[in-house]
Image (cartoon, rainbow, N blue to C red):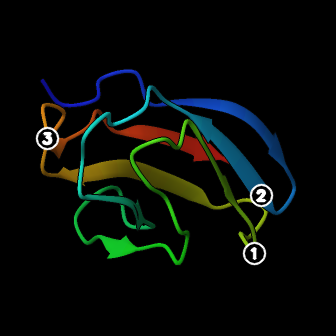
């Protein structure tokens, strides 16, 4: 079952903190980011692993809306997570 509890835990004018359950026995966890409403996605440069439950994304622009999604490879949590959006 893919991760379904990705959520925004906090924001600042240039950063966002995301929380989620761990990916248990995954081989890869990548946080994807979109700035065009989810039409185009690019990977963030965060180093996440199967034990990660928080992601802090810095260098964002105030007034912009961002969408985030986790892509998990391997294990019982493989697949795409829910999508969350945040406007700074």
SS class, disc 3: loop
Q: Earlier in the sequence, mark 1 or mark 2?
A: 2
Relative to 76, is 18 on the left or the right? right
Q: Which residue is mark 3?
A: 75
Name the residue at 18% across, 31% down: 2
Quadrant of the rendered structure where residue 1 is? top left
Q: Position of residue 43 (x, y in %)?
A: 38, 74
Name the residue at 64% across, 47% down: 87
Q: Position of residue 75 (x, y in %)?
A: 14, 40
Q: Which residue is mark 1?
A: 59
Q: Which residue is mark 2?
A: 15
C-beta proximity under 8 Å, tags 1 and 2: yes
* Mark 2 surroundings within 10 Å by alpha-carbon count, few (fewer than 14), some (14 through 19), many (20 or more): some
Q: Earlier in the sequence, mark 3 or mark 2?
A: 2
Residue 37 visible, this orientation: yes
Q: Earlier in the sequence, mark 1 or mark 3?
A: 1
Q: Position of residue 13 (x, y in %)?
A: 87, 56
Relative to 24, is 54 on the left or the right? right
C-beta proximity under 8 Å, tags 1 and 3: no
Q: Nearer the viewer, residue 67 or 45?
A: 45
Name the residue at 52% across, 56% down: 66
Q: Nearer the viewer, residue 22 or 39?
A: 22
Relative to 42, is 17 on the left or the right? right
SS class, disc 1: loop
Report the mark closest to the observer, 1 or 3: 3
């Amino acid at each position: 079952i893919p991760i379904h509890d990705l959520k925004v835990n906090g924001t600042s004018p240039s950063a966002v903190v995301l929380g989620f359950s761990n990916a248990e026995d995954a081989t890869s966890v990548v946080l994807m980011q979109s700035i065009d409403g989810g039409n185009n996605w690019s990977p963030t440069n965060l180093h996440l692993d199967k034990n990660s439950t928080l992601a802090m994304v810095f260098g964002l622009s105030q007034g912009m809306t961002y969408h985030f999604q986790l892509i998990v490879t391997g294990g019982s949590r493989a697949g795409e997570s829910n999508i969350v959006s945040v406007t700074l």
